[in-house]
Image (spheres, rainbow, N blue to C red):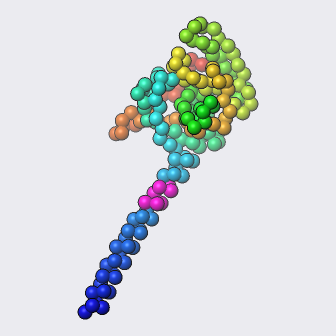
Amino acid sequence: MVGLVGRLWNLQYKSIVKEASGKALAVAKFFCVLHVTNTYLCTFALACGPNMVLTFNLTGDMFLAERLSIKFGKVGPGDIVLLRYPESPRKVMVKRLLGLESHSVTYVVDPMKSDRRDTVVVPKGHVWVEGDNIYNSRDSRQFGPVPYGPLEGKVFCKVTTFLSLAHLMLNFDAVNCT
């Protein structure tokens, strides 16, 4: 009798262990897929602060940024990009790309003090980025052209609520790029 109970207990224990290990493996696979997706394909991010206030809310909007366009060089003037902050690489910022290498970009030097404009030719391997709110943005006007390397993604979708997605208006006509 003890042998029968022992065998039944053993079978029940084995099925519980088998089921638990199967679920643990499924969770591990899910996190692996999530990591690969977030690192190489697409990521969620939060834009907060005043630098992109004309496109994103001051309190912060969530958005989706895909990473393949950056890898294949498929970004251009007017695109909103996700990039590492040149002065502090641990921080990520969201800016509008205004010029690629060899483009001539005209910008307002210090919009708080004057309307003086300057023109710069973006050097090879660099891009020119600015925030939409030029009165309160730290961008290429302060730290110059940014190397292409720190670019991490191209924003393609703004999450307005958890239930609805709205495509961003990526048209930007107020730029003089050639």
**At x 56% / y 27%, what residue is drawn?**
96
In the rendered image, residue 75, in percent from the top left (x then y), is placed at 61, 34
Residue at coordinates 34% horizontally, 39% vertically from top-left? Answer: 163
Tell me if residue 23 comes above or below residue 122 in the rendering. below
27 with respect to 121 (left or right): left
Q: Which image quadrant is residue 24 in?
A: bottom left
Q: Is residue 69 magenta?
A: no
Q: Nearer the viewer, residue 42 or 72?
A: 42
Let me know if residue 74 appears in the view.
Answer: no
Is there any visible trace of residue 121 in the rendered image? yes
Relative to residue 99, is residue 6 drawn left or right?
A: left
- Where residue 90 sits, quadrant-wise, is top right
- The residue at 72%/22% (across/down) is 121
Residue visible at 42% across and 26% down in the picture: 57
Which x, y percent locates residue 164? 36, 37
Main secondary structure type of the part rendered in magenta: helix
Identify the magenta region.
27-33
